[in-house]
Structures are given as C-alpha cells and as structure tokens.
Amino acid sequence: MSEIVNRVASSPIITIDLETFYRLEERVGFDLKEFLFQELVLREKEFRADLNKIDWDQYKGKLVAIFCSADAIVPNWAFMLVGTYLSKAGVEFVIGGMDDLEQYLFEKAISQVNPRDYENRPVVIKGCSKYPVPLYAYGRIQSIIQPYAKSIMYGEPCSTVPLYKAPK
C-alpha cells in the first residue's frame, strides 16, 4: 500500500492569511454630533470646554474613529482637536468612520510585509476568515506582492482561483 502524501503541506506555496493582520482591540467611535449646537453648528468655546471634561483614559487600549454623524459642516480643526486629546492619552485613532479605521489598520499591517519574501513563489491569498477583512486589504496585498510573486491565487490552498501568473 502506498503512503498518503499531503501535497498541499509539501508545496512551495506561501499562504497569506489577512486575518492574521486583524487587530483585536475594541473599536469605538467618537461622534462630534453630540457637541453641535442644535446638531448644526460647532461652537468653539463650548466645544473646547466639553473636551476638557472628558476622561480620555476611557479610550486607552481601544482604537478610535473620529467622525460626525450629523449632516453639518464641521471644521477640520475640530476633528484634529479631538485627535490631540486622544494622542495625549496614547490612543490610536483615525479621522473618519469605522471603515476608514479598518482600512488604516490593515494598511499599517500590510506595509510591514516584505514583498521579496514572495519572490518567485506561488502565493495564495486566503479567502475565508472569522474576522472582517476589508476588500481594500485584498487589493493592497496583491499590489505589493504581484511584482515579485511567481503566481497569485485566491482561496484555500486546496481550492484556489488563479489571479496572476508572472510572464516567463
């Protein structure tokens, strides 16, 4: 009887699991709507006073998206001012919505990838994950490794969709 060989395990294929880039910290939003007068206007003096009353330590260990859910014109400096308080508390944040926060986090992680690690290698970008991976991350990792990879596939090593093959 012949030995059963796991060809997937012995393959030169490198699998990129974007789920491993997912950060587990709690994500929270900081909505400027609550600081607007009649949900229309930001009054600087009152806004600054209200920000001074906040216990910024409540955001430590969390990832924060600073946004405004009201249909109001809010000056850019207001978002930035909130960012200064979060920075002082050592909190990582983005100005934008929760989707912007996820994109930022994945961009930060993907920027650490050394594309030369995939040089002349077949690569599978894993498709399934238990954490939400933004579509942006798939395109970003592809754009980084494609100039180096021998081939790029999407899915699982046992069932993939070919995306790219380097010219010979």
Image: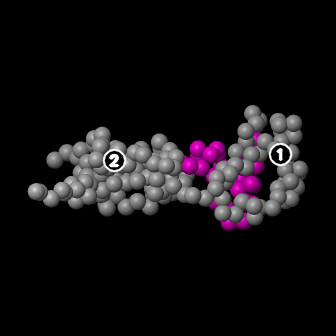
How many C-alpha atoms fall within 10 Å of the one at disc 2: few (<14), some, or many (≥20)?
Answer: some
Count of labels shown?
A: 2
Q: Looking at the image, which is closer to me, 8 or 73?
A: 8
Whether residue 80 sits left or right of residue 114 in the image: it is: right
- Is residue 101 rendered magenta in the image? yes
Which mark is drawn over residue 35? 1
Q: Looking at the image, which is closer to me, 3 or 117?
A: 3
Whether residue 91 sits left or right of residue 18 in the image: it is: right
Magenta stretch, main secondary structure, is: helix
Residue positioned 78% across, 42% down in the render: 33
How many C-alpha atoms fall within 10 Å of the one at disc 1: few (<14), some, or many (≥20)?
Answer: some
Q: Position of residue 165 (x, y in %)?
A: 24, 44
Amino acid type, label 2: Glu
- Secondary structure of the residue carrying tag 2 is strand
Q: Position of residue 35 (x, y in %)?
A: 83, 45
Structural distance between the alpha carbons of marks 2 and 1: 47 Å
View extreme (top): residue: 71
Q: Identify residue for label 2.
A: 156
Amino acid type, label 1: Phe
Residue 92 position (above or below residue 133): below
Can residue 147 be seen? no
View extreme (left): residue: 1
Earlier sequence position, callout 2 versus callout 1 = 1
Can residue 141 be seen? yes
Q: Position of residue 32 (x, y in %)?
A: 77, 45
- Is residue 2 rendered magenta in the image? no
Whether residue 65 sits left or right of residue 122 in the image: it is: right
Residue positioned 74% across, 54% down in the render: 82
Q: Position of residue 40 (x, y in %)?
A: 82, 36
The stretch of residues the image draws in magenta is 74-103
